[in-house]
Image (cartoon, rainbow, N blue to C red):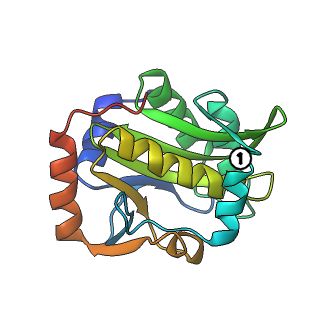
């Protein structure tokens, strides 16, 4: 499969995202009338129980140490939208410096991670997973701290779910999203 990196980046820069259908055969661009964002300001929150976990320093954080293992972890579900073609696209984007894995580790084992694309001041979260309880939650907190420190404008989580809601995730309409995305693409940021 030939991956056209510039076309893929242009699609994301216009507010679209790639997904496979349930069969894993058809890969297409999607958008929605509403997008879910993770706040990068003081609206970001997490449960007190997670604060205790963070204070215990049981997890370490790495970026891109086990990229394909994170992709596989995110795809390992009963129903997944991450097809083999999409895995190949993520790998190519990773090799070109666009796709990243933000990982938590415990005792030398991958505990959880978040897969996403960094486009200037925008981090577009594609998926997350965990193997050890709290692994993905700690990854979320540490990623938000990292994005703040690097002056990112937006953390796009694409679709709302109860897990993201606990972190203060909020829904924005497509017009507001595109305005924020435009601002993010004007800011020079780097994840690593």
Residue sitting nearer the eye, 97 or 43: 43
User: Residue 170 at x, y = what percent?
Assistant: 38, 74
User: Residue 29 at x, y = what percent?
Assistant: 37, 55
Residue sitting nearer the eye, 179 or 108: 108
Q: Is residue 41 above or below residue 90?
A: below
Which quadrant of the figure has residue 159? bottom left
Quick check: 129 left or right of 174? right
Mark 1 neighbour class, 10 Å CA radius: few under 14, some 14 to 19, many 20 or more: many
User: Residue 64 at x, y = what percent?
Assistant: 58, 29
Q: Residue drawn 34% across and 30% down?
A: 190
Which residue position is annotated with label 1?
73
User: Residue 172 at x, y = what percent?
Assistant: 29, 73
Q: Residue drawn 37% across and 40% down?
A: 149
**SS for callout 1:** helix
Q: Residue furthest top?
A: 95
Q: Residue furthest right?
A: 107
For residue 27, say whether it is visible.
no
């Amino acid at each position: 499969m030939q991956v056209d990196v510039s076309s893929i980046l242009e699609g994301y820069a216009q507010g679209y995202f790639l997904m496979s259908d349930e069969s894993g055969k058809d890969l297409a661009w999607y958008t929605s009338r509403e997008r879910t964002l993770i706040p990068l300001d003081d609206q970001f929150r997490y449960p007190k129980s997670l604060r205790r976990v963070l204070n215990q320093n049981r997890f370490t954080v790495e970026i891109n140490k086990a990229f394909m293992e994170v992709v596989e972890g995110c795809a390992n579900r009963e129903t997944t939208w991450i097809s083999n073609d999409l895995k190949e696209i993520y790998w190519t984007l990773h090799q070109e410096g666009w796709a990243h894995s933000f990982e938590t580790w415990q005792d030398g084992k991958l505990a959880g991670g978040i897969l996403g694309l960094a486009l200037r001041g925008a981090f577009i979260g594609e998926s997350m997973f965990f193997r050890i309880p709290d692994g993905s939650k700690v990854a979320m907190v540490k990623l938000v701290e990292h994005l703040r420190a690097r002056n990112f404008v937006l953390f796009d989580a694409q679709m709302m779910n109860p897990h993201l809601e606990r972190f203060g995730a909020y829904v924005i309409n497509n017009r507001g999203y595109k305005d924020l995305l435009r601002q993010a693409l004007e800011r020079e940021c780097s994840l690593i």
